[in-house]
């Protein structure tokens, strides 16, 4: 793997954060959109300096976008290039996805008034394509997991991190439509787990430890139980989400997807419209919007009781929820450069989960357009990738 230098604030235009500054106050002071300011900073900053609702207490510098160049709508539209499909008309595949990318990943879980975050770094590397058209990607976790900006410190957190680390790297099988369908290195994972379990038992003991390890033992009984346990993995479901398929001339398809939301229930089903923009955006990314509503037989009461199957005698009140996603793909290999997903379920205690994924590798310019021209002030407000 090639060496990727740590981001340096010296490479960017920055604002020095002063006492009393907030994200909103700085955005107002600079005359910039709050969402745009946060998204631009998060795209280039070190993982530990990601901005969530507001500035982290330790943050010293805010990365600013370069000065904007005013263009008319007509000029801006002319600069956007038409999407080119390499394999066949209106078809995207992973045939050119020979990449090794590291991604910063941020999960935000909102349970009523409580908000929790999980941060991690994950590497995705192409491995092979077999004769049946299935792709193989190695997915590896890099470094520590940070929960609410804090590394594992309690016994429970340390055991959880050590146990989950035994799963990686995963050799993920992806079908012709870009959907992950299986894990192909169960024997290596099971071997790593047995060694990890021995190491955990050397340093920890008690009923809690035994119960926690027994959960992993059940999940690793065979390759099928491993697959079922990983079916709730947010990263796998976000990254390999069935984008790479053949589209009609309208570049829009409707389909049913499922996504993990509530920990103790089966994944939740949504009926979504998946649409490809026929032109690259101003940063030369291929953009895919996925939007839809809850499409699950379970009622609100079923979800409240964490049931996997609908039990309609409890209640006929239908649950309400939505799914929104925006993907920015490299137009040469169709691999995600950044992803944002938000899904919610309107229960008595509202549930909302979001996933943000950003490529940490330095991206090669796809066109010869000068860098500063990629940041354009629009004459009419339009939604950006971090907005819905």
Image (spheres, helix red, strand yellow):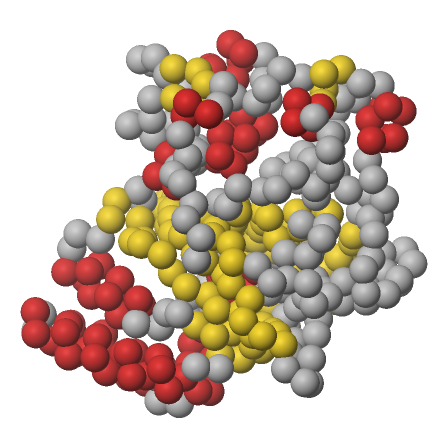
**Frontmost residue, 19 versus 7:** 7
Q: Residue at x 48, y 51 (%)?
A: 103
Q: Is residue 60 above or below residue 150?
A: above
| Residue found at the far right of this picture | 249
**Quadrant in the picture for residue 290:** bottom right
Can residue 227 be seen? yes
Q: In what quadrant of the picture does the C terminus appear?
A: top right
Residue at the image point whose x is 41% and y is 49% from the top = 3
Residue 123 occupies quadrant = bottom left
Does residue 227 sit above or below 81 in this rendering?
below
Residue that sits furthest to the top in the current view: 29
Q: Is residue 134 left or right of residue 308?
A: right
Q: Does residue 362 sit above or below 299 in this rendering?
A: above
Left or right side of 326 for 101: left
**Residue 87: where, in percent of width, then height?**
81, 65
Asked if residue 375 shows in the view, the reply is no
Q: For the N terminus, which image quadrant?
A: bottom left
């Amino acid at each position: 793997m090639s060496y990727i230098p740590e981001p340096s604030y010296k490479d960017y235009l920055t604002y020095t954060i002063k006492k009393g500054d907030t994200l909103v106050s700085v955005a107002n002071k600079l005359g910039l959109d709050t969402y745009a300011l946060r998204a631009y900073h998060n795209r280039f900053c070190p993982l530990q300096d990601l901005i969530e609702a507001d500035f982290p207490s330790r943050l010293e510098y805010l990365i600013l976008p370069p000065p904007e160049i005013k263009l008319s709508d007509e000029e801006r539209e002319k600069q956007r290039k038409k999407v080119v499909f390499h394999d066949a008309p209106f078809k995207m595949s992973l045939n050119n996805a020979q990449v090794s990318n590291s991604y910063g990943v941020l999960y935000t879980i909102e349970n009523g008034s409580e908000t929790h975050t999980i941060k991690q770094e994950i590497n995705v590397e192409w491995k092979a394509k077999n004769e049946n058209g299935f792709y193989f990607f190695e997915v590896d976790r890099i470094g520590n997991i940070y929960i609410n900006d804090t590394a594992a410190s309690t016994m429970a957190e340390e055991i959880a991190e050590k146990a989950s680390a035994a799963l990686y790297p995963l050799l993920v099988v992806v079908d012709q439509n870009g959907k992950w369908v299986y894990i192909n290195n169960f024997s290596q994972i099971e071997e790593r787990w047995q060694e990890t379990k021995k190491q955990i038992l050397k340093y920890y003991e008690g009923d809690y430890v035994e119960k926690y390890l027994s959960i992993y033992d059940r999940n690793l009984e065979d390759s099928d139980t491993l697959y079922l346990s990983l079916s709730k993995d947010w990263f796998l479901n976000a990254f390999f989400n069935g984008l790479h398929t053949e589209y009609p001339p309208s570049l829009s398809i409707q389909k049913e997807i499922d996504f993990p939301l509530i920990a103790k229930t089966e994944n939740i089903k949504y009926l979504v419209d998946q649409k490809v923009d026929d032109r690259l955006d101003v940063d030369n990314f291929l953009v895919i919007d996925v939007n839809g509503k809850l499409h699950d037989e379970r009622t609100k009461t079923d979800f409240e009781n964490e049931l996997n199957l609908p039990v309609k005698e409890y209640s006929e009140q239908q649950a309400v929820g939505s799914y929104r996603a925006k993907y920015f793909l490299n137009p040469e290999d169709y691999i995600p450069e950044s992803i944002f997903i938000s899904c919610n379920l309107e229960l008595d205690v509202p549930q909302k989960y979001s996933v943000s994924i950003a490529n940490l590798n330095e991206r090669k310019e796809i066109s010869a357009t000068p860098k500063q021209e990629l940041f354009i002030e629009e004459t009419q407000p339009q939604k950006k990738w971090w907005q819905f």
